[in-house]
Amino acid sequence: MKAIEYNVDLIRHLVWRDFLLRYKRSLLGVLWSLLLPLAQLAVLVLVFQKIVPLNIEDYPAFVFCGLLPWMWFSSCLGSAGYLFTYNRDLVRRPNFKPPILVAVNTLSNSIHFLIFLPVLFLMLAFYGRHPAFPLVFLPLLFLIQSGLIFGLSLITATLNVFYEDAQYAMTVAVTLLFYLTPVWYPAEAVGEKYRLLYAVNPLSVLVQSYRAIFFQAASPQWNLLLLAAITSAMVLCLGCLIYRRLSSAMHDFL
Amino acid sequence: MPPILEVESVSKVFKTLSRRPSTLQEWLARWWSSRQNRKEAFWALREVTFSLERGRSLGIIGHNGAGKSTLLRLLCGLGRPTSGRITCSGSVSGLLELGSGVHLDMTGRENIMTAGILNGLTKRQVLAQLDGIIEFSELEDFIDHPARTYSNGMFLRLAFSTAIHFDPDVIMIDEVLAVGDARFQQKCIDRLQVFRKAGKTLVLVSHDTEQIRRLCDEVLVMEEAAGRHFGVAVEETIREK
């Protein structure tokens, strides 16, 4: 009982601390984190519905389904590299397990996803798309994506202690991935030749799956999702391996 | 009863930290000439061995660079020794470099909460202690200001009163007491005496032999990365040195 209370307090405190530090010196504070997804949604809708129309039905809702998981992913990995170096005060304490910071970062960025879920449902309802049975798979998608984000973040955070190139490389990768992930276009539009590229990219499969359950009221493509789950699990294991290997050297560098 | 702290021939080697290649170009150059340019190792600790019974307190003295701080950090579980073994049975609280456990953008109060929770307390338990901590630190007027505005002395007050109030089994202090003014130092020493009387264990690194005399039962003299003397007779060991 005590252990549960303690761990809840620990995670809650660290998530709260993360929020506090992020917006401590700004006027709008947490509002910024709400503004960003909406601004990005507005621009994508403007560009791909009005300026260069992709002619996708109910485009705002279509984009938002992909944008929410994408923003969770990109905001986590955009900051992952500095998790250990900026939080030296925590990492250099006896008994502190640094991977907790990675877990907290993964969680605290998922809050935006959760906050915007009602907005998404309103939007879907506006277009006459009502929640259907496949929504029960949402926790599963969350779980797979958490694993993927946690693994990649742990790798980035650990390597970044030694060489900051890790975060730079990750930032480049995330920027490019935005175009290579079917966030603002349908995966079906991808040519036959490039299908494989999208099948092996777990993030792209996840975005498609979210869209399936929210937008199309359909089940995810199980074979692709299984592959994505396996890839995510492997990334997670790799992250843990790298961390275990380097964690003691890490303290010498921090 | 087994000793609370056991250190068995612990060594720590830093591999050319300062000579780490900082750019790709340098790295390539290093790799090219790697055969002539053998890696240098810096031995921060060499075969240090001692053990400490529960309730005893240990003073560590030695010149700058003798390995005292490295030893203390390993004792706190920060990093692993290159060889040897450290076993510690009990909760540890450490006062290492000043401000190492403090986030500068957070207020004193928020930092106390972080410290408490990371020391294994629940939020409720920390809140119960909060007033006592602030009172001991005498930082009432500054506790809601960001730590960035604190002086070294204030860091010490915050860190010391936080560490001692969470009631660890072992407390490790690295020289930091010297930063406080005479009155606060005395207050810390009095508090540490109470802590010792409660059967807790203290490990203190200090250049102030007077402090060691008053607070420690045993003393370890570090010389060139090795523990040279380990004596129960504090007086004699200090004089010998």
Image: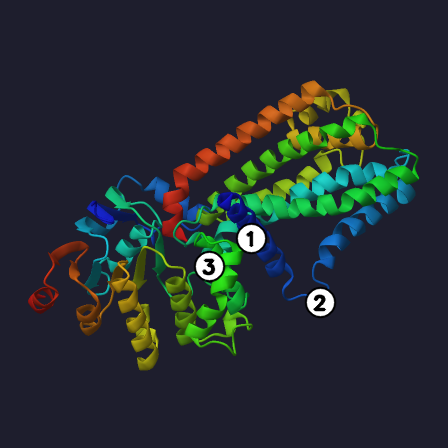
Q: Residue at x 70, y 62 (%)?
A: A29
Compare marks 2 and 1 and give the one earlier in the sequence.
1
Disc 1 marks a residue whose amino acid type is: Leu
- The kind of secondary structure element at disc 1 is helix
In the drawing, what numbered circle is on residue A61? Answer: none
User: Is A98 situated left or right of B59 in this image?
Assistant: right
Q: Residue at x 82, y 45 (%)?
A: A119
The chain carrying label 3 is: B
Q: What residue is disc 2 on? A: A27
- Residue A99 picture location, percent across and down: 49, 43
Cα separation, mark 2 vs mark 1, equals 22 Å
Q: Can residue A167 be seen?
A: no
Q: Kindly indicate whether the residue at mark 3 contacts the one at mark 2 (C-beta within 8 angstroms).
A: no
Q: Residue at x 87, y 38 (%)?
A: A124
Q: What residue is disc 3 on? A: B115
Whether B3 is drawn above or below B66: the answer is: above
Disc 2 marks a residue whose amino acid type is: Leu
The chain carrying label 1 is: A
User: Is A46 situated left or right of A207 in this image?
Assistant: right
Q: What residue is disc 1 on? A: A14
